[in-house]
Image: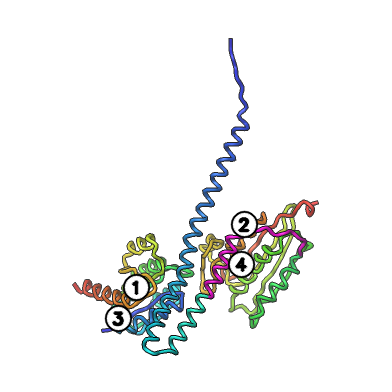
Amino acid sequence: MKIPVTVVDDEQVDRYTVRRRLSRHGGFRDVVEVESGDVFLDVHCSGSSDIETDGLPLLILMDINMPGRNGFETVREMEVRQSRGLAVPSIVVTMLTSSGNPRDKAEADKLPLVRGYIEKPLDADGAQRLFDLYHAELKARAA
Amino acid sequence: MVMCTVIDLTERLETERRLTEKAREAEALNVELARFAESASHDLKAPLVSISGLLSLCIEDLDEGDIAVARENLNKALAVSRESAEKLETALALARAHRERYPNERLALGELVRPIWSDIVVSEECPPSLLFDFQTDDSFVGARVPVTMVLSNLLSNAIRFRDHSRERAEVRVSCRKDENHFWVSITDNGIGIAKRDRAKLFRMFERFDSRSGDGMGLALARKQVERLGGQISVNSVPGEGSEFSFTLPLNEEEVR
């Protein structure tokens, strides 16, 4: 089973690095790239989405600092839309950011949808951490 | 017997008032500096992180003999590093803005705007129309460099945030004078600015849209206008357009 994954990040170069790292790891599907939180909400959390998950939770790698809604605002809005049945029903969010600011980490901890916090750039270890984190979450949900 | 002493406290009270005011100004400056340091360090770190991500992929690509891909990614890393050097240059201009002194000279708004406009629209396939609406003689006394910086920021924003669904994009430059001020407005019929973004508009590194630049243009514009003794403000209706206005004080010679 390969993990369905989306990266929400305004930096094209950073999305590219994620795509390459996850493809090298081998445990992930092709990365769906989205260039901002606002676009993600419009295209994938407004009643329908073309991301194929085959019933698996969608792993979302969410940047924090983006024009328009930042990563936290996007996740909060996703929660609202999920409760109304408008968003992808099952998701695992990990913040993927260049910010090492403790305030950002604390903020991420407060959001129920967020399961991890990884600092950029994503490397081989980071890809493995994402893989482990996702499978731990699957196990927890099955229990 | 009644003895009475009268001490005039006016001067002491005035000194105290001035000290409180100074303390408040220092406090505001500290808050601004802290915010500057935080956003600057984040925004300067982000491109370095992007570059290191690319370079580590390059090393692996080279190890595997994939030279074409490595070359492509080195070029990407080069582009990111150049962009970020330019950004740093703007940040330095902003930091210097309050120290540099520029000579005052007699300027004319129309003559300032035309060359800026031609520079900006040179790469535009179908540039908006530029209209002048001068309700007064457009000459004023001011410092050429900072005024040009402000105008070019406002004009390029007006173009960048145009509404492509509109048949005719327009940018209107107007001016008027009152007793003490020269007023300049740049009005566009672009996409407008949401109310929640307006409060943060002039802050450092705030970006609202993928069309935004480095998030420093309006912060720099405000700094320059305030340093010249004026004020900058914005009015906007989403879907209809935006109007940025700034004032410059008329000097005594002009007032007379």
Mark 1 and mark 2: span between their CA atoms?
52 Å
- The residue wearing badge 4 is B242
Q: Who's the residue at 51% across and 56% down the image?
A: B33
Taking depth in this image into account, of B143 and B121 the one nearest to the observer is B143
Mark 4 and mark 1: span between their CA atoms?
36 Å
- The residue wearing badge 3 is A3
State left or right for residue A63 relative to residue B120: left
Residue type, mark 2 in image: His
Question: Circle 3 marks a residue in which chain?
Answer: A
- The residue wearing badge 1 is A85
Question: Circle 4 marks a residue in which chain?
Answer: B
Q: Position of residue B40 (x, y in %)?
A: 49, 63
- The residue wearing badge 2 is B98
- Seen in the picture, residue B69 relative to A124 is either above or below; the reply is below
Q: Which-is-in-front pick, marks 3 and 4?
A: 3
Decide if residue B101 is in sight here: yes
Q: Who's the residue at 39% across and 72% down the image?
A: A120
Q: Are marks 3 and 2 on the same chain?
A: no
Residue type, mark 3 in image: Ile
Label 2 residue SS: loop
Q: Give the quarter of the image for residue B161.
A: bottom right
Residues at circles 3 and 1 in contact by the CB criterion of under 8 Å: no
